[in-house]
Amino acid sequence: MQLQLLGSGRKHYVIQRTQRARLTNHYENTFASICVTCPHRETGLCGTLLESEACSQPGWQHFAAARAGEQIVVRNQPYDDVFVLCAGWAFRYFQLSDGRRQILKFLLPGDAFSSAAVFEKSFPFSVKALTEVQLSGFVRSEIRARCAANPDIQSAVASSCIADFRDATELLTSLGQRSAEERIAHLLLHLMPRIAARNVIREQRYPFPLRQQHIADAVGLTPVHVSRVLSLFRDRRLVALSEGTLTVFNLPELERIGTLR
Amino acid sequence: MQLQLLGSGRKHYVIQRTQRARLTNHYENTFASICVTCPHRETGLCGTLLESEACSQPGWQHFAAARAGEQIVVRNQPYDDVFVLCAGWAFRYFQLSDGRRQILKFLLPGDAFSSAAVFEKSFPFSVKALTEVQLSGFVRSEIRARCAANPDIQSAVASSCIADFRDATELLTSLGQRSAEERIAHLLLHLMPRIAARNVIREQRYPFPLRQQHIADAVGLTPVHVSRVLSLFRDRRLVALSEGTLTVFNLPELERIGTLR
DNA sequence: CGGCAGTTTGATGTTACTCAATTTAAGTGG
DNA sequence: CCACTTAAATTGAGTAACATCAAACTGCCG
């Protein structure tokens, strides 16, 4: 495993505890501080783990960072850590040998790379950083021990699994049964509350770092067609997507199109 | 919850322990006998549960049966039991209000209806019987207690979750990125080892109760198009599908088309 | 100012859908 | 055993949705 430390030419995997203060300082208000303070309302895994005296015990938590576009996890390779995203966006994906890829889920701060990682060393997918990211790894054996001892952690892991499972169910239905417009609307509707749980949203403007290529790979369309559908949405004063911001003009209509009913 | 007992007009949900001997007798070689003896090599949940002195304790295991086409589980409704399929085929699906449905997974004997059911009362999908089925329900609270006590059960539940998760990943990639031929080939290749784990296969002939409508709903195509693709496969001496039997003539070629690489 | 990545637009091609008719297979009752 | 019924599968013709290819455009950065 190779992770490049932000702004540095040297390769790091684990940022030692001694470096942590400096990093926390440098990337103020992200990293450990986010890890601890951000509510992570959806999965809450990181928060739950940290609340359980994790921070006070050195050695079983690691920190790392990666630049935008960098691959963080390779499918089918073993890892000894359970990873949680602390800051930035990443995504799970499945790469085909001919270049096509399916994006399985976008990861936001607080999300575990894999909810099943507590039980399994390897992943059925790869993970790539979408923006600059900071992440935290918890030694698996420690988590399992705490899982057995602490029902809170156990239920945090379980509900993370359940949420992933429900998402996969909806995405499968979306890909298998629905039109391009419906799929894209559904993706936006799926992401909006997740973004809102981690950011203050004003005037229906959501931070949104995806390129159209990412949307295309997530909903199984070509970037060209995504562009056409988004233009259509813009012309109809539904939503607009530019400069890393998603602006929602007509939420009811978007829901009418995108919600699975 | 309503389940109709096979061959009977009366509505049953729980077949009491006192009835079990009679039923086991009537449907000889299925039911409890299958539940206990069938290796269930894939998930093994049922087997693991039963080996743990489950059978010896009345009251926390229930039995039921359903006819082909009958709905067994309704999405978002709470259930107190964790269900495992004992005999026959069933499938998880997501129903849309306009009639379209996405089949998420075909369930074979030994499969849990939902791997997450140990933690969650309701399902993110519905379940319907494909053939006549017999199923077993384990009281959730009992399973959770045993999970905590017995690492074997715990790991059986975990590996069932992991298998489901990997399947969902592959299916998402298949639906999002691949052509009709590739998707159908992939579905067949996915099912073959699972069928083989539960049946003796001779001369590459697999028991296969799916209608083309089921295949269509599983891979996100119309039944008409499924028919065309299957005709193509038949003409090319790849596979043939008739009378509830899948016959494989050219496995390497099928794998070349269907395998995710 | 030039280069680059990302987006937009147009023209054309392909895949898979729709509709409808026909064939096949599987029961069912006489 | 054979007409009759019904569900499923097949086939053909026309169409819609999305892909592909290629060119032009935009904003950004050095």
Image (spheres, coloured by chain):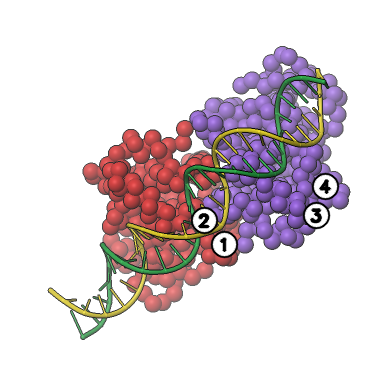
Chain colours: A purple, B red, C green, D yellow
Mark 4–mark 1 CB contact (< 8 Å): no
Mark 2 or mark 1, earlier in chain:
1
Give the labeled residue for mark 3: A249
Q: Chain of mark 1?
A: B
| Label 3 to label 2: alpha-carbon separation | 31 Å
**Amino acid type assigned to the residue bearing label 2 in the image:** Gln
Residue linked to disc 2? B102
Name the mark nearer the viewer: 3 or 4. 3
Q: Describe the element under mark 1 as helix, strand or loop.
A: loop
SS for dot 2:
strand
Q: Share a chain, discs 3 and 4? A: yes
Q: Is residue B179 above or below residue A14?
A: below
Residue D20 appears left or right of B49? right
Q: Quadrant of residue A77?
A: top right
Secondary structure type for disc 3: loop
For the point 71% across and 52% down, the residue is A232
Q: Label 4 marks which chain's residue?
A: A
Q: Which residue is mark 4?
A: A205
Q: Are marks 2 and 1 on the same chain?
A: yes
Contact check, label 2 and label 4, Cβ < 8 Å:
no
Q: Quadrant of residue A1?
A: top right
Q: Secondary structure at mark 4?
A: strand
- The x, y position of residue A251, in whole percent, is 76, 57
Residue at 71 percent across and 28 percent down: it is A68
The kind of residue on which mark 4 rests is: Arg
Kindly identify the residue that appears in the image at 23 percent across and 43 percent down.
B203
